[in-house]
Amino acid sequence: MRWVALTAVAPVAWGANYYVTHEFLPPDSPLYGAALRALPAGLVLLGLCRKRPRGAWWWRSAVLGLLNVSVFFVLVYAASQLLPTSIASTVMAVSPLAMMLIAWALLSERPGRAHLAGAATGLGGVCLMLFTGAGGVSVPGVLASAAAMLVSAFGHILTKRWNDTRTDVLASTAWQLTAGGLFLLPVAAVVEGPPPALSPSALLAFGYVTLVATALAFAAWFTGLRHLPSGTVGLIGLLNPVTGVLLGTVVAGEVLTVRQLCGLALVLTGVVLGRPTRAGRRGHGRTPPHPVSDERPVQESAAGDPR
């Protein structure tokens, strides 16, 4: 359960990130906003781990940086500006199902009944929260959030496939963030022109976005992907919309209806249903996780997988 608790840091930080971005960051600079989020976080983690990529990790870092950072951060930034905090974070809660299906295809991780039940329950809660709130919903904002969900689900499972015990999680996270930030900077300069002027509140907001919602959150999330089944990690991600809805209601004054409260309860129930079982934890402790690489993919039978 310590890995569950550590992994939960990420979706809680990401749920708060929607509010911070919506309220304090410049609305017309998604490319600079994403670059200023990614590159400083990557450099901070590089300073802590002091390791550089070797071999295949040069191109892997570029691919993962493009998916998990460059494209994902821009889409999340746009969704945060176009949607209320509660709605922007809620759309992302469909990711457990996407992660399970992608993990099944890429990692041969067959989703268990508990994971599927948790994902279905959580998805029901998401629908209640998304379609029963007050006010209209921006279609471009929903599309941006949905695209961010799909890109991140694929990128996170690809990260799990390529990571192994020989690769330090902090280092691989730093490489991805740095690569993604470096991709974004020239594009931002061409498309958006000079960097936006930042107020003191925006600088403080970028401090939270960079250090907490990016450096800390991604290190915790990728650590969880290494030590937990993909289905469990995806369901822990349901804490993202819970945090976003609560912050949107308590801090931003967004209206939370009775049906949305029921949706929150369903989402939390989905997280509980998909938690690691006692047998699964014992099996995971006895058998170390097998790295899955391009050279030798590991095939696990559904009957032999204790999860």
Image: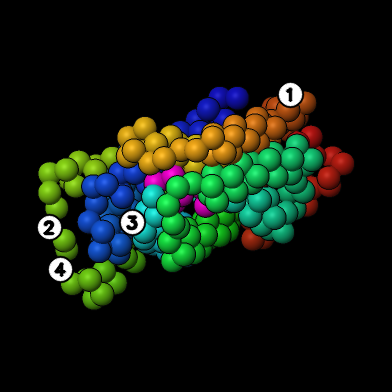
Q: Are marks 3 and 4 in contact (CB under 8 Å)?
A: no
**How far apart are labels 3 and 4 at the CA level?**
20 Å
Picture quadrant where residue 262 is located: top right
Instruction: Name which of mark 2 and mark 1 comes first in the sequence.
Output: 2
Q: Which residues are magenta?
A: 85-91
Q: Which residue is mark 4?
A: 194
18 left or right of 290 in image:
left
**How far apart are labels 3 and 2 at the CA level?**
18 Å
**Which three-letter amino acid code belongs to the residue tagged 2?**
Ala
Q: Which residue is mark 3?
A: 81
Instruction: Name which of mark 1 and mark 3 comes first in the sequence.
Output: 3
| Secondary structure type for disc 4 | loop
**How far apart are labels 1 and 3 at the CA level?**
42 Å
**Which three-letter amino acid code belongs to the residue tagged 4?**
Pro
132 or 219: nearer the eye? Answer: 132
In this rendering, is residue 279 above or below 133? above
Looking at the image, is mark 4 or mark 2 nearer the viewer?
A: 2
Q: Which residue is mark 1?
A: 278
Looking at the image, is mark 2 or mark 1 nearer the viewer?
A: 2
In this rendering, is residue 39 above or below 267? below
**How far apart are labels 4 and 2 at the CA level?**
9 Å
Q: Which residue is mark 2?
A: 197
Q: Please, what is the dominant secondary structure of the magenta stretch?
A: helix
Q: Quadrant of the C terminus?
A: top right
- Tell me which residue sits at (55%, 51%) in the image: 131
Q: Are marks 2 and 1 in contact (CB under 8 Å)?
A: no
| Secondary structure type for disc 1 | helix
**Which three-letter amino acid code belongs to the residue tagged 3?**
Gln
